[in-house]
């Protein structure tokens, strides 16, 4: 009997049953492995999502009982309450953010890097919107976003530091990632960043310029900054509030309360030693200055 060639070719695909069984098993095992890998990846992603939960801390700025914003004039400020101010810049960095739970335990917040307002270590709060006397851009940022380990918390406060951590403060701004790539917030590689930049026009005066940052920084033989005599990173602690419901408010009226803003030469503090304009500002920030010791900061308060 003649067997058609096509039939032989087809049957030849499985002339050795054992080999065919092994091939089928290998194929099935491969599919099972792929399926297992996909399930494993999905489980890992699910675990990552379930192991943390998002948090948002909102910031605001005010001058006494009024919201601080560009394009408006504020009177009754400074020592004696006789100065009138219009903001031209208000920005500051925050880091080392911790929420405090009902047991008093600090829960560190891992910042969510967004390639604009914050990286995994530092966030920039920006109130200047290019209106009125303000320069810069129209974009603002008043929130710090991040995650904490998943859990059932009853928040009773928060703590953070104003400024940029030492490890990042003396890097090359040209190579830094946002928000540390702003030359307007940078002094020099040795001094580092301006942790707080506050500027404004004062009626009858040369104006207000406040730049807070580290001073007295020393470098080694290799040119690496190893320490700063005055780090100037104040710790802010606000207790008795739920930071997920209440805003952190920077009250500029409290910052400027003991400063003579009406002096014709203007008020200028670049954080260096021996500047009479810096002394009352540093006290309000809670920082040591000259022979005056560090105290509790006064300018950040809990808002609604």
Image (spheres, grey):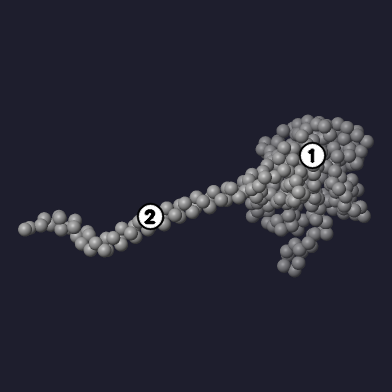
In primary-sequence order, the first of circles 2 and 1 is 2
Locate the C terminus by quadrant. Answer: top right
261, 243: nearer the viewer: 243
Label 1: how many residues lie within 10 Å, few (<14), some (14-19) or many (20+)? Answer: many
User: Visible in this render: residue 110?
Assistant: yes
Label 2: how many residues lie within 10 Å, few (<14), some (14-19) or many (20+)? Answer: few
Residue 19 in picture, x, y percent from top left:
27, 63
Residue 57 left/right relative to 8: right
Locate the N terminus by quadrant. Answer: bottom left
Q: Residue at x 68, y 52 (%)?
A: 121
Which quadrant holds residue 188? bottom right
Q: Nearer the viewer, mark 2 or mark 1?
A: 2
Which quadrant holds residue 299? top right
Residue 95 in picture, x, y percent from top left:
72, 50
145, 287: nearer the viewer: 145
Q: Are marks 2 and 1 in contact (CB under 8 Å)?
A: no
Could you tell me how many numbered marks the image carries?
A: 2
Mark 2 vs mark 1, CA separation in Å: 57 Å
Secondary structure under badge 1? strand
Residue 158 left/right relative to 112: right
The disc placed on residue 31 is: 2
Residue 52 in picture, x, y percent from top left:
62, 48
User: Visible in this render: residue 111?
Assistant: no
Residue 8 left/right relative to 242: left
The residue under label 1 is 302
Residue 238 left/right relative to 40: right
Q: Residue at x 78, y 36 (%)?
A: 303
Secondary structure under badge 2? helix
The disc placed on residue 107 is: none
Residue 39 in picture, x, y percent from top left:
47, 51
Which quadrant holds residue 81? top right
- Residue sitting farthest toward the left: 1
């Amino acid at each position: 009997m003649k067997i058609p060639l096509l039939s032989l070719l087809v049957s030849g695909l499985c002339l050795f049953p054992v080999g065919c069984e092994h091939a089928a098993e290998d194929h099935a095992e491969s599919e099972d492995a792929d399926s297992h890998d996909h399930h494993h990846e999905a489980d890992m992603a699910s675990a990552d999502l379930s192991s943390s939960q998002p948090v948002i801390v909102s910031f605001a700025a005010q001058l006494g009982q009024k919201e601080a914003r560009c394009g408006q004039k504020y009177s009754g400020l400074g020592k004696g309450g006789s100065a009138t101010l219009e903001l031209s810049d208000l920005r500051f960095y925050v880091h080392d953010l911790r929420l405090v739970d009902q047991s008093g335990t600090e829960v560190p917040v891992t910042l969510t890097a967004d390639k604009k307002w914050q990286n995994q270590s530092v966030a920039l709060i920006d109130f200047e919107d290019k209106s009125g006397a303000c320069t810069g851009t129209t974009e603002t940022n008043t929130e710090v976003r991040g995650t904490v380990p998943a859990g059932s918390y009853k928040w009773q406060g928060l703590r953070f530091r104003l400024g940029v951590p030492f490890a990042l403060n003396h890097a090359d701004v040209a190579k830094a990632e946002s928000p540390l790539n702003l030359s307007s917030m940078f002094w020099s590689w040795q001094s580092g960043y301006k942790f707080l930049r506050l500027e404004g026009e004062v009626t009858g005066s040369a104006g207000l310029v406040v730049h807070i940052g580290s001073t007295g920084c020393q470098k080694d033989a290799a040119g690496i900054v190893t320490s700063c005599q005055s780090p100037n990173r104040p710790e802010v602690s606000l207790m008795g509030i739920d930071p997920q419901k209440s805003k952190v408010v920077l009250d500029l009226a409290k910052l400027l309360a003991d400063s003579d803003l009406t002096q014709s030469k203007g008020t200028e503090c670049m954080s260096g030693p021996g500047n009479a304009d810096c002394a009352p500002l540093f006290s309000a920030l809670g920082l040591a200055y000259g022979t005056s010791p560090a105290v509790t900061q006064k300018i950040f308060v809990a808002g609604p």
